[in-house]
Amino acid sequence: MFAIAIDGPAGAGKSSVAKALAKALGFAYVDTGALYRAIALFMIENQVDLTDPEAVSARLPQVEVGLEYGPEGQRTLLAGRDVSQDIRTQEVSMAASRWVAHIPRVRAFLLDLQRDLARRADVVMDGRDIGTVILPGAQLKVFLTASAEERARRRTLQLDAAGEAADFDQVLREVAQRDRQDAAQLEAVPPDAVRLDATELSFEQVVEKILELARARMDGAGGKG
């Protein structure tokens, strides 16, 4: 199987780029962040104290989270319920990033699920620690980044399009906070990763650059699989 791992800071466009790559290559797209968001949503809905790692960890055996693929792309399931839209709110996003994703038992809980997806299909996977922990053997690793201001601008537009009121300065502060929270992961860049700064690039240019890298690696490996 062929795996593409995309790491980078929040708001760099990892998910959108990964989706486009997967579609162009005929791969499965795996949004690992959606899994952490789903766990955060479960904890919020069940009124679990997110600031207490032990309380969150104790409820993990009750969490049934998974990903499903269809004509519309990836769907995130929580106990069989499609929560693909519910996990995209600012509340869930910040809860996942600030608390849930930093709990070792949560990360261990999801590790096998993520690796199993890559064993069963050619994948494009984005999130945190993809190239270093989850898929260290990925044939192509990309560290996608952009300036904090550009990432905040994109996030503001995304929220506006979704009908959520968004203030650029507030979003910029949240982006900076996310960077501080994710500092350890952002510093642990795979040594064999290709760094790509998307600040001055269009979405199409970013996708095309990574497609070129992927196709070159696949040609060198004799094709997919």
Image: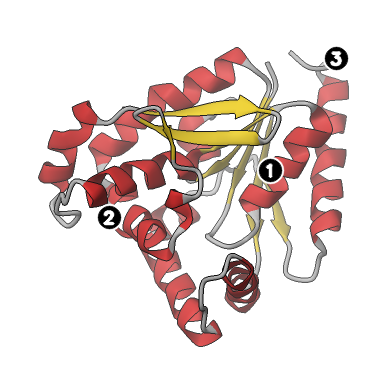
Which residue: 65% across, 74% down?
150
The image's mark for residue 99 is 2
Q: Residues within 10 Å of mark 1 (few under 14, many from 20)?
A: many
- Would you identify the image quadrant in which residue 141 lies? top right
Task: Tell me which numbered mark, 2 or 1, is placed earlier along the sequence.
Answer: 1
- What residue sits right under mark 1 in the picture? 18
Tag nearer the camera, 2 or 3: 2
Q: Residues within 10 Å of mark 3 (few under 14, many from 20)?
A: few
Which one is in front, 44 or 15?
A: 44
Give how far apart the Cα atoms at labels 1 and 3 are: 22 Å
- What residue sits right under mark 3 in the picture? 222
Which one is in front, 191 or 76?
A: 76
Viewed as shown, does residue 12 lie left or right of 90?
right
Image coords of residue 24 (percent x, y):
83, 35
Identity, as a three-letter code, of the amino acid under mark 3: Gly
Say how many tags the image has: 3
Q: Is residue 31 above or below residue 64?
A: below
